[in-house]
Structure formats: structure tokens, C-alpha cells
């Protein structure tokens, strides 16, 4: 046990901090497994979801949950959990602009993702219960990791808000947020009311450069957040985000090229402009 405390730079006797660090390390490690597994197996939701109970797909288990309901249930533990921990914050977090900034950034993304985005959705494809539950569990865990770090474990210098990593990270987060929301809007407007599984080539915004502009925006968001926070849990979250949705972006790119064949823009990358 003493070796773990020393290896993870945790003061002796701080058992919750040790648990928190170990969860962060576990998320880092699982991001590698997630990346390689999702390269070969695409989670059956969205365009890959079964349309009805009889349409069996690999890893699609349990009843199908309406898309809007599934999104609210699976995403809401992150902002609610982070808010609870923030309400129980330590005095040092209450008086430090850095902690306040990170809390607001996290809540901005997840309030939109959990409560606003589902209201904007058209009639999306239903989601298998097991996929919804796995996402719910991750958001519950991540709400604890980020919320507890921001409200308790991350102790910043009073001038940290002016540091280079913060000055780069915060604008990067907001640019990624803008790209993510703009790209979601473009995708939502591709379908007319009542249309399900009707695909068109998205154009505008970052779709000029990549097929998965919405995923690119979210990856940029959490990279900016990790830079600003400069902590183990935020870095683990950023890497896990890339590992989880990066390969899905590749799958979407391949799916669009297959559907539209010669008419799909050949210069458009999958996820990272001009690179990948």
C-alpha cells in the first residue's frame, strides 16, 4: 500500500485521493483497450443501431430505448455529479478562479449534451439498453473523477489562471465546443422532420475538412480542458474521449464513402484535418 501512495504521489493516509488516482490510471489504461476494440467493433447506436427488436446486431443487448430518453439518462450523471461535488467543495476551490473556470467548462458541455442536445434531436434511432447503461456508468464515474478533482484534489496556485497551459487550453475548449455544436446542427438539419436513417453529405463548417466534424470538435474540447486543468483525471478523460469516438469517426467516414461512392469529397479526411 505504501508503494502505491508513493508511486501515485499521494500523501500517506489519503485513501480517497489514492482511490481517485487509481481510477484515473484505470481510465488511462482502458483508453488503449477501448481504442483498439472500437477500431474493429462499432457500437450499435446511431446509424449502426438496430431499427427494431428483431434486428439483432453484435453487442446490442436488451430492449431498445428511444434516442432522446437514452441521451438524457446516460449523459446526465456527469453534470449532476460534478455539481454535487462542487456544492461540497473545499474552501481553497471556492476562492480560486482556476477551479471555478474548470467547473464552468465541464458544466457548459454536459448541460448542453445531456439536456439541450436531446431536445434538438429529430426522431433518432433507438439505443440498445446495454449501450445506454455503459455510457451512463462512464458518465457517473467521470462526474466523480472530474468533479472531485475540481472541487477538492486539484490545488492551484492563485496565478494559475494566467499560466500558458490555461491561456491555450480555455480558448481551445471553446473552439472545440463551437465546432461540436455547429457540426451537430449541420447534421440535425440534414434530415427533414420525421426522417430516420436518411443520409446526405454534410457540408459547411469543419465538414469541409473532416467527415466526423462533431467528434473532432469534442476531442478538441477535452484536449483544451486537459491542458487547462493540467491534471491526471482530465488527461485520462481526454485520451479516453479520443479512444472512444476517434475510431467511430473512421467508421462514419468509411460508411459515407460507401454510401456516396464517387460523389463523396475525396479530399475530406476522417477525423483530423489533412492527417487522418
Image (tube, rainbow, N blue to C red):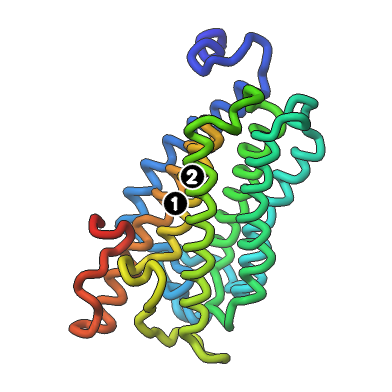
Q: x, y percentage for residue 96?
A: 71, 30
Q: Quadrant of the C terminus?
A: bottom left
Please give left or right for residue 274 compared with residue 178 in the image. left
Q: Closer to the camera, 74 or 78? A: 78
- How many numbered marks does the figure carry? 2
Q: x, y percentage for residue 47?
A: 43, 75
Residue at image location 38% in from the left, 61% down from the top = 248
Q: Answer whether residue 192 is visible to the viewer in this image.
A: yes
Q: Which residue is labeled 1 in the image?
A: 220
Is residue 155 shown above or below 188?
above
Residue at image location 40% in from the left, 65% down from the top = 213
Proximity of marks 1 and 2: CB atoms separated by less than 8 Å: yes
Please give left or right for residue 32 compared with residue 257 in the image. right
Instruction: Determine whether the residue tagged by mark 1 lies in a helix, strand or loop.
Output: helix
Q: Closer to the camera, 94 or 3? A: 94
Residue at image location 64% in from the left, 62% down from the top = 112
Q: x, y percentage for residue 126?
A: 56, 75
Instruction: Determine whether the residue tagged by mark 2 lies in a helix, strand or loop.
Output: helix
Q: Closer to the camera, 215 or 44? A: 215
Please give left or right for residue 155 compared with residue 215 in the image. right
Numbered badge on residue 91: none
Q: Answer whether residue 237 is visible to the viewer in this image.
A: no
From mark 1 to mark 2, how far is it between C-alphas? Answer: 6 Å
Q: Which residue is labeled 2 in the image?
A: 224
Q: x, y percentage for residue 67?
A: 59, 73
Residue at image location 25% in from the left, 80% down from the top = 264
- Residue 203 position by quadrant: bottom left
Amino acid at each position: 500500500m505504501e508503494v502505491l501512495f508513493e508511486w501515485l504521489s499521494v500523501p500517506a493516509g489519503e485513501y480517497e485521493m489514492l482511490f481517485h488516482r487509481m481510477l484515473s490510471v484505470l481510465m488511462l489504461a482502458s483508453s488503449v483497450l477501448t481504442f483498439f476494440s472500437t477500431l474493429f467493433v462499432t457500437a450499435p447506436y446511431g446509424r449502426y443501431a438496430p431499427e427494431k427488436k428483431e434486428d439483432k446486431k453484435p453487442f446490442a443487448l436488451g430492449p431498445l430505448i428511444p434516442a432522446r430518453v437514452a441521451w438524457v439518462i446516460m449523459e446526465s450523471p456527469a453534470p449532476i455529479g460534478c455539481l454535487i461535488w462542487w456544492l461540497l467543495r473545499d474552501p481553497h476551490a471556492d476562492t480560486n478562479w482556476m477551479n471555478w473556470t474548470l467547473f464552468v467548462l465541464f458544466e457548459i458541455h454536459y448541460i448542453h449534451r445531456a439536456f439541450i442536445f436531446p431536445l434538438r434531436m429529430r426522431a433518432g434511432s433507438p439505443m440498445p439498453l446495454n449501450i445506454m447503461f455503459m455510457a451512463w456508468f462512464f458518465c457517473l464515474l467521470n462526474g466523480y473523477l472530474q468533479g472531485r478533482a475540481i472541487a477538492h484534489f486539484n490545488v492551484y496556485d492563485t496565478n494559475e489562471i494566467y499560466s500558458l497551459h490555461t491561456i491555450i487550453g480555455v480558448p481551445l475548449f471553446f473552439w472545440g465546443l463551437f465546432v461540436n455544436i455547429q457540426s451537430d446542427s449541420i447534421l440535425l438539419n440534414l434530415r427533414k422532420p420525421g426522417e430516420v436513417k436518411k443520409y446526405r453529405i454534410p457540408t459547411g463548417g469543419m465538414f469541409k475538412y473532416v467527415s466526423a466534424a462533431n467528434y473532432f470538435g469534442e476531442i478538441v474540447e477535452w484536449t483544451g480542458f486537459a491542458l487547462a486543468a493540467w491534471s491526471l483525471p482530465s488527461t485520462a478523460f481526454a485520451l479516453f474521449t479520443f479512444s472512444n469516438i476517434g475510431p467511430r469517426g473512421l467508421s462514419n467516414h468509411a460508411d459515407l464513402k460507401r454510401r456516396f461512392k464517387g460523389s463523396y469529397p475525396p479530399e475530406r479526411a476522417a477525423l483530423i484535418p489533412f492527417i487522418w
